[in-house]
Image (cartoon, grey):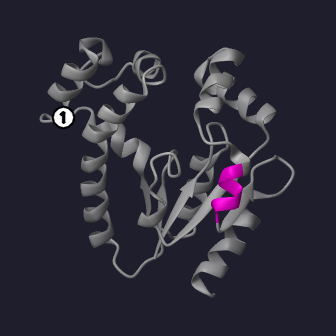
Amino acid sequence: MVVGLTGGIGSGKTTVANLFEIIGCPVFYSDVVAKEIYFNETIKPKIINLLGKEAYVSSTKIDKKYISSKIFSDTNLLHQLNAIIHPAVIEKFVQFKELHKNKLIIKETALLFEAKLENEVDKIILVAANDELRIKRVMQRDNLSKEDVTSKIKAQLPQEEKILKSDFVIYNDEKDFLITQVLEIYRKLTNA
């Protein structure tokens, strides 16, 4: 079974993914794999052709701020970039699934709904947190202004909409224990 794990920016989906990994679930980190793909020898020239050399800071680092500024202001550019990156991520995921047959696989994907990937997973877990907390986390983590974080949140599907489309919701609100919520969902998914 493949379970999609998603959540808006600053919701804490990576923390939740780490908890699933600790309890023994193989976790496919789509965003990490996507960043690695930027450096694939056949992909890199396509990215440079689309976004320019400025997309790369060095041979091991992309300029996330530059790329975001380009794609968040031009949806056509975003679709073109996704057309380059997504097929390669899918290929890596097929290999990952082959390695972990007959296991509960967690597929961590930030833009699961935005990229219309709901049909590629059997169940969906959403990590949710209030906007104020999400803004605070991302400002601290990425050293961004409140305005920058707010515009990123607005570029994503509203959290309320994602809740309605999800099978499970984990509230990362610093009130409820994450591990308790993760274990409860894990039991339901594995009938343990």
Q: Viewed as shown, does residue 176 lie left or right of 125? A: right
Residue 144, above or below 99: above
The residue beneath circle 1 is 43
Rendered residue at 34%/73% (across/down): 100
- At 53% from the left and 51% from the top, the residue drawn is 113
| Residue found 34% across the figure and 23% down from its top | 62
Q: Residue 50, percent across and down? A: 24, 22
Residue 96, x across and y down, in percent: 31, 63
Going by the image, does 75 lie left or right of 131? Answer: left
Q: Going by the picture, which residue comes out furthest to the right?
A: 175
Q: Is 171 left or right of 40, judged from the image as shown?
A: right
Secondary structure beneath label 1? loop
Answer with the quarter of the image where residue 10 lies: top right
- The residue lying furthest to the left in this view is 42
Residue nearest the viewer, comparing 13 with 159: 159
| Quadrant location, the C terminus | bottom right
